[in-house]
Image (cartoon, grey):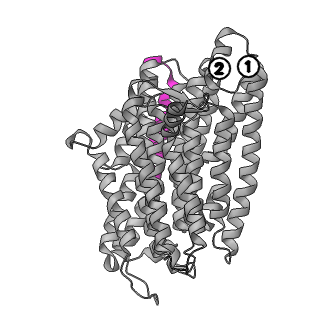
């Protein structure tokens, strides 16, 4: 009995480390000024995150041979969960490091921030490490409640409080729709475990009409969480008002968890109904790619531009989900692998951008307009080079991770069209390429301002980037290039693609 409990705790060690570190930070805050320096709180938060990532690697080898469940099936340990959990933990570590200087400059360096990030990461890890629908919902709510607070962390800024309120209202609305969908699944099948749902569907016990309604509700609920059109309207305001490092975390870790749940729900529980979801995913992908890219062109605020960029990339990810709904086994496998590579490739580039944005932002809210980036290379040549790498990656320019990610996703869509003989996937690929071309316009505008415009008069004092900022920019830039070089390096895209292949549910 004791052995089984220990094994179960070891299986959820990544999430356990995050939760324990979060509680340690909360309790440690009470001793600040009584012999404990606040830097210890950051160290505790980073220790919990790094240990969680270490346990993720340790669990990978046993899970690669056979997945297993613990706590009576409430938690699932497989390569899919560990791969996405690793992405979430990496985003958490980089967010914590980049937040230290940012919070100190704004006079908001308190332990509660780091604890909330850890609790949110715990919820996201729980979401991807289970096949139980109500545990997915529990993890989602744990992550969301922490993010509602983080979005309004600048309590003296009206825009920050507005973003928190909007995120709370739309998040609650989306969660209620998602929970209603899960309840409909239980009504139709008598179970909330995805494996049991699949068995009920295959045996013909489930009501088709109820299951299709449940599928539509789940897609709408999760569509809000990953911000696809027409469920994206909260994203620009929330991304703009939230602290920049929190925005980076929301745009990366939250999306990774959301797409992880979508993949698992579609492939495990609703496999028989995938063709019925295809039409919805097709039109959502097209609307998301075109609308987000076109609106992003008109943005002058860099954070709002990145918000619409995040929406557009969700549309590209939906292209891969669409392939899953088609009866093309070869292309479907390629789509899952491509999407699983897309998530970390997009994450490192986006985190790099928001780290630089957080450094340039000042206490009066300046540093967020395109004009503020004019002549940036003269003041910060290193950060400008990093920003160029990230922008080119998000635009899909080789030899960056973004190019290879789009190559695999678009390749899967084209393969689906060839394999099925349908023109629908090929039309989607054309829209994806068109959207990428539009995206290049507003991405390259940032580089034009940085390298081809003269700097404006600025009364802000020049300051060197903090060590944490430089570290995060360097790491994300190296990963962005490394993952884009493919088989040209010993450990890079080839390995990540191999892990993504092994992580297919």
- What range of the chain is rendered magenta? 419-439
Against 149, residue 127 (above or below) is: above
Q: Find residue 462 and report its horizontal and vertical position in percent.
A: 39, 86
Seen from the viewer's position, the closer of residues 399 and 5 is 5
Seen from the viewer's position, the closer of residues 329 and 427 is 329
Contact check, label 2 and label 1, Cβ < 8 Å: yes
Seen from the viewer's position, the closer of residues 432 and 229 is 229
Q: Secondary structure at mark 2?
A: helix
Q: Residue at x 38, y 68 (%)?
A: 448
> Of label 2 and label 1, which has the lower sequence position?
1
Q: Residue at x 55, y 25 (%)?
A: 267
Q: Which residue is mark 2?
A: 196
Against 495, residue 27 (above or below) is: below
Q: Find residue 270 and report its horizontal and vertical position in percent.
A: 62, 23
Q: Along the horizontal axis of the image, is 192 left or right of 409?
A: right
Q: Residue 343 is drawn in which quadrant? A: top left
Against 441, residue 334 (above or below) is: above
The N terminus: image quadrant: top right
Q: Which residue is mark 1?
A: 189
Q: Along the horizontal axis of the image, is 237 left or right of 308?
A: right
Q: Find residue 51 and report its horizontal and vertical position in percent.
A: 42, 51
Q: CA gap, disc 2 to disc 1?
A: 8 Å
Q: Along the horizontal axis of the image, is 30 left or right of 425?
A: right
Residue with the most extreme bottom position? 459
The number of numbered badges drawn on the structure is 2
423 is within the stretch colored magenta: yes
């Amino acid at each position: 009995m004791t052995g089984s409990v220990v094994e179960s705790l070891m299986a959820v060690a990544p999430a356990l480390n995050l939760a324990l570190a979060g509680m340690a930070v909360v309790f440690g805050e009470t001793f600040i000024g009584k012999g404990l320096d606040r830097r210890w709180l950051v160290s505790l938060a980073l220790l919990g995150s790094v240990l969680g990532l270490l346990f993720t690697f340790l669990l990978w080898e046993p899970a690669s041979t056979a997945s297993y469940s613990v706590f009576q099936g409430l938690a699932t340990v497989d390569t899919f969960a560990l791969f996405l959990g690793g992405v979430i933990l990496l985003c958490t570590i980089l967010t914590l490091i980049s937040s230290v200087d940012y919070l100190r400059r704004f006079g908001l360096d308190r332990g509660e921030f780091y604890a909330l990030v850890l609790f949110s990461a715990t919820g996201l890890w729980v979401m991807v490490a289970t096949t139980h629908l109500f545990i997915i919902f529990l993890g989602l709510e744990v992550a969301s409640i922490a993010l509602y607070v983080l979005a309004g962390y600048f309590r003296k800024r009206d825009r920050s409080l507005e973003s928190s309120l909007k995120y709370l209202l739309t998040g609650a609305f989306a969660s209620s729709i998602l929970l209603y969908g899960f309840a409909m699944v239980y009504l139709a099948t008598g179970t909330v475990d995805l494996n049991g749902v699949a068995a009920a569907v295959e045996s013909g016990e489930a009501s088709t009409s109820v299951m299709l309604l449940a599928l539509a509700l789940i897609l709408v609920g999760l569509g809000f969480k990953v911000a696809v059109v027409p469920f994206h309207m909260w994203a620009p305001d929330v991304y703009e008002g939230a602290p920049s490092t929190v925005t980076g975390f929301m745009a990366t870790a939250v999306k990774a968890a959301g797409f992880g749940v979508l993949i698992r729900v579609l492939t495990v529980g609703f496999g028989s109904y995938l063709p019925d979801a295809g039409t919805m995913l097709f039109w959502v992908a097209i609307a998301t790619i075109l609308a987000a890219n076109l609106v992003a062109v008109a943005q002058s605020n860099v954070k709002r531009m990145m918000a619409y960029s995040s929406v557009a990339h969700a549309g590209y990810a939906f292209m891969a989900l669409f392939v899953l709904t088609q009866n093309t086994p070869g292309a479907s496998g390629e789509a899952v692998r491509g999407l699983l590579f897309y998530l970390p490739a997009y994450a490192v580039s986006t985190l790099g951008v928001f780290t630089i944005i957080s450094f340039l932002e000042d206490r009066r809210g300046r540093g967020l307009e395109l004009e503020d980036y004019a002549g940036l290379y003269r003041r910060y040549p290193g950060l400008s080079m990093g920003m160029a790498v990230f922008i080119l990656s998000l635009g899909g320019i080789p030899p960056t991770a973004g190019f290879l990610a789009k190559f695999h996703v678009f390749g899967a869509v084209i393969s689906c069209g060839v394999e099925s003989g349908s023109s629908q996937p090929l039309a989607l690929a054309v829209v994806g390429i068109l959207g990428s071309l539009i995206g290049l316009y507003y991405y390259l505008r940032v580089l034009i301002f940085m390298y081809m415009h003269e700097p404006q008069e600025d009364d802000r004092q020049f300051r060197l980037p903090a060590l944490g900022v430089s570290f995060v920019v360097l790491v994300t830039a190296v990963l962005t290039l490394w993952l884009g070089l493919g088989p040209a390096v010993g450990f890079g895209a080839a390995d990540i693609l191999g892990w993504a292949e092994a992580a297919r549910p």
